[in-house]
Amino acid sequence: MTLRVVVADDQALVRVGFRGIIEATPGFTVVGEAGNGQEAIEITRQAQPDVVLMDVRMPVMDGIEATRQIVAAPGISGTASGVRVLILTTFDLDEYVYAALRAGASGFLLKDTDPADLLTAIRVVAAGDALLAPSITRRLIGEFARLPDAVPGPQPDKLLGCLTEREVEVLALVARGLSNGEIADQLVISPATAKTHVAHLLAKLNARDRVQLVILGYQSGLAKVT
């Protein structure tokens, strides 16, 4: 299966660089480029990619609003969550990054990332997981979780009351950035069982994706910023 990618960045050299890395690797292809958020929406609708690499600060429409519209659009890839958005950032932890989480981004990628990490990030996000590498997550989620409107709705402690003891254990591990396979190893269960537990957490906590599970894990105190 070839993963289809759209690259959205207002700097042509950045787009060329990412395209070169992606298309030089079997199993990946770039199906479109965009220089601003509005173009990103239009190209995504036309090209039906699996993942959009989205810059934040772009002219015409920024990457935050573009992400919000792409994630919510029922006409893109058939469902409201059919396309995953991976934010390109210099990681300065400003409100743009927090807003990206609220808009539905599935993860963050540093612009100076290694090529191998770029490809791994695309695979992870395309598979439906959030890109929550410890090198980024501890500071990002820790700061984001302190915002009063980080996760609207019931308080985390009330939400956690509906979880089983095992689900609480799984949530704590998700919040630490572990994959389903790593959770399975940690709890000595099968990867399929770990995946089932994560699915139950998403449903019970009414979380959009793994990113929101991480935020809930930090807000509830199950995970700590280190």
Image (tube, rainbow, N blue to C red):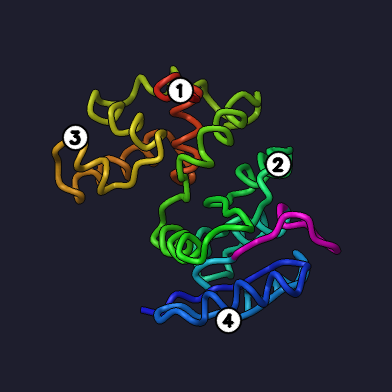
Instruction: Answer whether labels 3 and 2 touch (C-beta < 8 Å).
Output: no
Q: CA distance from mark 3 to mark 1?
A: 20 Å
Q: CA distance from mark 2 to mark 4?
A: 29 Å
Q: Neighbour class for label 3 at 10 Å: few (<14), some, many (≥20)?
A: few
Q: Which residue is mark 4?
A: 31
Q: Position of residue 118 (x, y in %)?
A: 51, 63
Residue plotted at (38% across, 23% down): 160
Q: Is residue 187 above or below residue 50?
A: above
Q: Neighbour class for label 4 at 10 Å: few (<14), some, many (≥20)?
A: many
Q: Neighbour class for label 1 at 10 Å: few (<14), some, many (≥20)?
A: some
- Helix, strand or loop at label 3? It is helix
Residue 187 image label:
3
Which residues fall within the magenta stretch? Answer: 53-64
Q: Position of residue 176 (x, y in %)?
A: 40, 34
Q: Earlier in the sequence, mark 2 or mark 4?
A: 4
Q: Earlier in the sequence, mark 3 or mark 1?
A: 3
Q: Is residue 50 above or below residue 189?
A: below
Residue 101 image label:
none
- Helix, strand or loop at label 1? It is loop
